[in-house]
Every structure is written in structure tokens, then in C-alpha cells.
Amino acid sequence: MKIAKAIRQQAITAERVAASAADAYVANQMKSLAQAFRAQAEILKKKKKKKKK
């Protein structure tokens, strides 16, 4: 599995946990974590594209 894809999977998991969290603080933390995972995956994707050129 490619690294960017694995990170996107982690983002999906974090969003799922955020949706099911009873505590608002935990839900917000997990949403932030998911957003960070997505940003990291995008950076990796851009780096890979840049390397190919």
C-alpha cells in the first residue's frame, strides 16, 4: 500500500471515530487529526509528482 493512500485511510478512520465520539473535545481532536492526515497525504502526492518531472 502506498504511503499517501495509507495516510488517507487513517484520515477516514479518524473521521469515523470523531463521528462516534461522545466527548466533543475528542471529536474535535479527531477531526483535526483527520485534516492533518489529508494535508500530509497531499504534500506527499505533490512531492511524488515533482520527483517524476
Image (cartoon, helix red, strand yellow):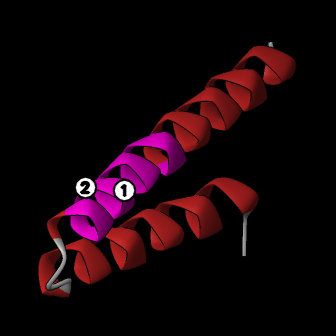
Magenta-drawn stretch, dominant element (helix, strand or loop)? helix
For residue 31, what is the image quadrant? bottom left
Could you tell me which quadrant the N terminus lies in?
bottom right
Residue at 38% across / 71% down in the picture? 14
Q: Is residue 8 left or right of residue 30?
A: right
Question: For numbered disc 2, what is the local secondary structure?
Answer: helix
- Callout 2 touching callout 1 (CB < 8 Å): yes
Q: Amino acid at mark 2?
A: Asn
Q: Is residue 17 above or below residue 53?
A: below
Q: CA distance from mark 2 to mark 1?
A: 4 Å
- Residue 6 placement (x, y as % from top left): 62, 69
Q: Residues within 10 Å of mark 2 (few under 14, many from 20)?
A: some
Which residue was labeled with disc 2? 28
Report how many numbered discs are placed on residues in the image. Answer: 2
Q: Amino acid at mark 1?
A: Gln
Q: Is residue 32 magenta?
A: yes
Q: Is residue 30 above or below residue 37?
A: below
For residue 29, which numbered disc appears in the image? 1
Residue at 36% across / 63% down in the picture? 30
Observer-nearest of 49 and 27: 27
Could you tell me which quadrant the C terminus lies in?
top right
Range drawn in magenta? 25-37
Question: For numbered disc 1, what is the local secondary structure?
Answer: helix
